[in-house]
Amino acid sequence: NAGVTQTPKFQVLKTGQSMTLQCAQDMNHNSMYWYRQDPGMGLRLIYYSASEGTTDKGEVPNGYNVSRLNKREFSLRLESAAPSQTSVYFCASSDPSGGADTQYFGPGTRLTVL
Amino acid sequence: DAKTTQPPSMDCAEGRAANLPCNHSTISGNEYVYWYRQIHSQGPQYIIHGLKNNETNEMASLIITEDRKSSTLILPHATLRDTAVYYCIVRVIWVNDMRFGAGTRLTVKP
């Protein structure tokens, strides 16, 4: 099992450009999440999806949109990138029915907006 | 805001036990204590969680005080590979609201 995979690993954008970050999990988890981590800080939740077809805002949703394409895939879109969105983006998944509700994280996408 | 307070950094000698404290004085009765760690720039990794009883797994032990206002994560025999940022998180299980603070940067030294 690959666990949680993210593409791309690195990306540089110019202000105003758009892009989509991709995330996929092969653990048959119902819940998926997108976090961002700024230098020296902890992770902050952007959006989450409790199940296929549902999405909800987290702590810092402004400037982002998400799509839960199917049970495996959860994408994050930046419509008009801003320098304040320079960050490392982590995707995670979990199975709340599994007792511990442990979140499994991907390796991250390092995004720089110039 | 994170509901926990952790020291920003700690050192530990290789082979010794690492004891990482966490204060969560406003914890509610239905909130669990979770610990994750982040090695270098990788995604966070789950370590352990508990409600009120002490817990142990293959990675670590979690000691929660009787009043549940603080806890300690214990790595019994720290190795260089345990150097990481450790996050203590309190959350209601199955609710999608996991708030990470700044964590404790643990450095294991030879």
Image (spheres, coloured by chain):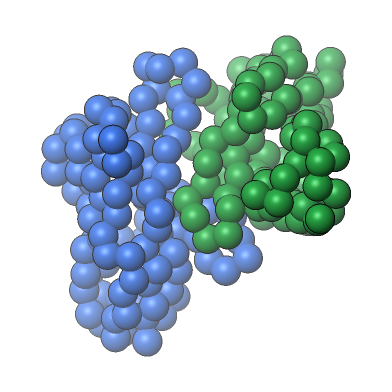
Chain colours: A blue, B green
**Which residue corresponds to the image point at 33% horizontal and 65% vertical from the top-left?**
A9
**Residue B40 image-quadrant placement:** bottom right
Work out whether residue B43 or residue B89 is closer to the camera in this orientation and state it.
Answer: B43
Screen quadrant of the N terminus of chain A:
top left
Residue B84: percent from left, percent from top: 66, 52
Instruction: Answer left or right for B93 relative to A49.
Output: right
Question: Which residue in the rendered view is the most extreme toward the top?
Answer: B53
- The residue under the point 39% across, 22% down is A96
Residue at the spot x=37%, y=17% of the render? A97
The residue lying at 85 percent from left, 49 percent from top is B13
Query: Which quadrant would residue B28 be assigned to in this image?
Result: top right
Residue A48, position as x, y percentages in the image: 34, 42
The residue lying toward the viewer, choosing from B46 and B101, is B46
Return the residue nearer the eye: A34 or A58: A34
Please tell me whether residue B52 is drawn above or below residue A13 in the rendered image.
above
Q: Is residue B99 left or right of residue A96?
A: right
In this rendering, position of residue A52 left or right of residue A100? left
Q: Is residue A52 visible?
A: yes
Q: Does A81 appear above or below B3?
A: below
Q: Position of residue A3 (x, y in %)?
A: 32, 39
